[in-house]
Image (cartoon, grey):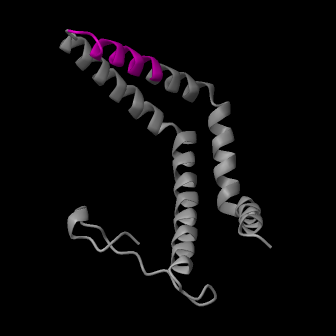
Amino acid sequence: MSVIAKTRELGAVIQQDERYARFLQARQNNEKDDDLNGLIGKLNLIQMSYQNEAAKDEPDQAKMEGYDKEFREVYAQVMQNPNMIAYEAAKAEVDAMMNEVMQLLTLCVNGEDPATCEIPEEHSCGGSCSTCGGCH
Protein backbone atom coordinates (compact mmCIF):
# COMPACT_ATOMS: atom_id res chain seq x y z
CA MET A 1 0.00 0.00 0.00
CA SER A 2 1.30 3.47 -0.84
CA VAL A 3 2.18 6.23 1.62
CA ILE A 4 -0.67 8.32 0.22
CA ALA A 5 -3.19 5.51 0.76
CA LYS A 6 -2.05 5.10 4.36
CA THR A 7 -2.23 8.86 4.85
CA ARG A 8 -5.83 8.78 3.66
CA GLU A 9 -6.52 6.04 6.22
CA LEU A 10 -4.95 8.20 8.93
CA GLY A 11 -7.14 11.11 7.81
CA ALA A 12 -10.21 8.92 8.21
CA VAL A 13 -9.12 7.86 11.70
CA ILE A 14 -8.52 11.49 12.67
CA GLN A 15 -12.03 12.37 11.50
CA GLN A 16 -13.41 9.65 13.80
CA ASP A 17 -11.55 11.02 16.85
CA GLU A 18 -13.69 12.68 19.54
CA ARG A 19 -11.45 15.77 19.47
CA TYR A 20 -12.18 16.23 15.78
CA ALA A 21 -15.91 15.73 16.41
CA ARG A 22 -15.85 18.49 19.07
CA PHE A 23 -13.96 20.77 16.68
CA LEU A 24 -16.42 20.13 13.86
CA GLN A 25 -19.41 20.78 16.14
CA ALA A 26 -17.84 23.99 17.48
CA ARG A 27 -17.16 25.20 13.93
CA GLN A 28 -20.78 24.50 12.94
CA ASN A 29 -22.00 26.35 16.04
CA ASN A 30 -19.91 29.36 15.02
CA GLU A 31 -21.36 29.29 11.52
CA LYS A 32 -24.92 29.34 12.95
CA ASP A 33 -24.24 32.16 15.43
CA ASP A 34 -25.62 35.30 13.76
CA ASP A 35 -24.29 37.62 16.48
CA LEU A 36 -20.80 36.19 16.16
CA ASN A 37 -20.86 36.39 12.37
CA GLY A 38 -22.03 39.98 12.56
CA LEU A 39 -19.09 40.85 14.79
CA ILE A 40 -16.66 39.06 12.46
CA GLY A 41 -18.12 40.95 9.51
CA LYS A 42 -17.66 44.19 11.43
CA LEU A 43 -14.03 43.25 12.13
CA ASN A 44 -13.45 42.71 8.42
CA LEU A 45 -14.92 46.12 7.58
CA ILE A 46 -12.80 47.84 10.21
CA GLN A 47 -9.70 46.10 8.89
CA MET A 48 -10.49 47.16 5.31
CA SER A 49 -11.04 50.76 6.43
CA TYR A 50 -7.72 50.69 8.29
CA GLN A 51 -5.89 49.27 5.26
CA ASN A 52 -7.48 51.81 2.91
CA GLU A 53 -6.42 54.65 5.19
CA ALA A 54 -2.91 53.22 5.61
CA ALA A 55 -2.50 52.96 1.82
CA LYS A 56 -3.04 56.70 1.33
CA ASP A 57 -0.06 58.94 0.64
CA GLU A 58 -0.78 60.81 3.85
CA PRO A 59 -2.85 58.59 6.14
CA ASP A 60 -4.85 60.26 8.89
CA GLN A 61 -3.25 58.94 12.09
CA ALA A 62 -6.30 59.82 14.19
CA LYS A 63 -8.52 57.72 11.91
CA MET A 64 -6.07 54.84 12.01
CA GLU A 65 -5.92 54.97 15.81
CA GLY A 66 -9.72 55.03 15.90
CA TYR A 67 -9.92 51.99 13.63
CA ASP A 68 -7.33 50.22 15.76
CA LYS A 69 -9.25 50.96 18.96
CA GLU A 70 -12.56 49.86 17.44
CA PHE A 71 -10.93 46.69 16.08
CA ARG A 72 -9.60 45.76 19.50
CA GLU A 73 -12.99 46.34 21.13
CA VAL A 74 -14.89 44.23 18.58
CA TYR A 75 -12.18 41.54 18.64
CA ALA A 76 -12.58 41.29 22.42
CA GLN A 77 -16.33 40.80 21.94
CA VAL A 78 -15.67 38.05 19.37
CA MET A 79 -13.28 36.24 21.70
CA GLN A 80 -15.75 36.46 24.61
CA ASN A 81 -18.53 34.82 22.61
CA PRO A 82 -19.32 31.38 24.14
CA ASN A 83 -19.27 29.69 20.73
CA MET A 84 -15.89 31.21 19.91
CA ILE A 85 -14.52 30.14 23.30
CA ALA A 86 -15.68 26.56 22.64
CA TYR A 87 -14.25 26.70 19.11
CA GLU A 88 -10.86 27.92 20.30
CA ALA A 89 -10.71 25.15 22.94
CA ALA A 90 -11.67 22.47 20.40
CA LYS A 91 -9.22 23.84 17.85
CA ALA A 92 -6.43 23.73 20.44
CA GLU A 93 -7.18 20.05 21.06
CA VAL A 94 -7.04 19.23 17.34
CA ASP A 95 -3.88 21.31 16.91
CA ALA A 96 -2.24 19.40 19.79
CA MET A 97 -3.26 16.08 18.23
CA MET A 98 -1.87 17.11 14.85
CA ASN A 99 1.34 18.34 16.47
CA GLU A 100 1.75 14.94 18.12
CA VAL A 101 1.12 13.16 14.80
CA MET A 102 3.68 15.36 13.04
CA GLN A 103 6.27 14.80 15.77
CA LEU A 104 5.83 11.05 15.52
CA LEU A 105 6.11 11.14 11.73
CA THR A 106 9.25 13.27 12.02
CA LEU A 107 10.82 10.71 14.37
CA CYS A 108 10.03 7.95 11.88
CA VAL A 109 11.45 9.92 8.94
CA ASN A 110 14.60 10.45 11.01
CA GLY A 111 15.03 6.69 11.32
CA GLU A 112 13.36 5.92 14.64
CA ASP A 113 11.47 2.65 15.00
CA PRO A 114 7.79 3.48 14.29
CA ALA A 115 6.63 0.81 16.73
CA THR A 116 8.64 2.03 19.70
CA CYS A 117 9.69 5.65 19.24
CA GLU A 118 8.42 8.09 21.83
CA ILE A 119 7.73 11.78 21.50
CA PRO A 120 9.95 13.74 23.89
CA GLU A 121 8.16 15.40 26.78
CA GLU A 122 7.15 18.99 26.23
CA HIS A 123 9.51 21.62 27.49
CA SER A 124 8.80 25.19 28.34
CA CYS A 125 9.99 27.65 25.79
CA GLY A 126 11.77 30.79 26.84
CA GLY A 127 10.83 32.39 23.54
CA SER A 128 14.33 32.82 22.17
CA CYS A 129 14.84 30.63 19.12
CA SER A 130 18.52 31.58 18.95
CA THR A 131 19.34 29.43 22.00
CA CYS A 132 16.90 26.65 21.23
CA GLY A 133 17.77 23.12 20.16
CA GLY A 134 14.49 22.85 18.29
CA CYS A 135 10.80 22.72 19.08
CA HIS A 136 9.30 19.49 20.31
Quadrant for residue 13, please give it.
Answer: bottom right
Left or right of residue 98, residue 25 in this image: right
Q: Residue shown at 54%/70% (left/top)?
A: 100
Left or right of residue 2, residue 85 in this image: left
34 or 96: nearer the eye? Answer: 96
Q: Residue furthest right?
A: 1
Q: Residue shown at 41%/72% (left/top)?
A: 136
91 in relation to 51, above or below: below
123 in relation to 62, above or below: below
Residue 84 belongs to magenta span: no
Residue 53 belongs to magenta span: yes
Left or right of residue 61, residue 125 in this image: right
Quadrant for residue 20, please give it.
Answer: bottom right
What residue span does the magenta drawing correspond to? 44-57
125 in relation to 58, above or below: below
- The picture places residue 24, in percent across and down from the top left corner, at 68, 48
- The picture places residue 98, in percent across and down from the top left corner, at 57, 63
Q: Residue furthest front?
A: 2
Q: Count of labels shown?
A: 0
- The picture places residue 72, in percent across and down from the top left corner, at 33, 29
Quadrant for residue 38, please give it.
Answer: top right
- What is the magenta segment's predominant secondary structure? helix
54 or 42: nearer the eye? Answer: 54
- The picture places residue 112, in percent across and down from the top left corner, at 54, 86
96 or 12: nearer the eye? Answer: 12
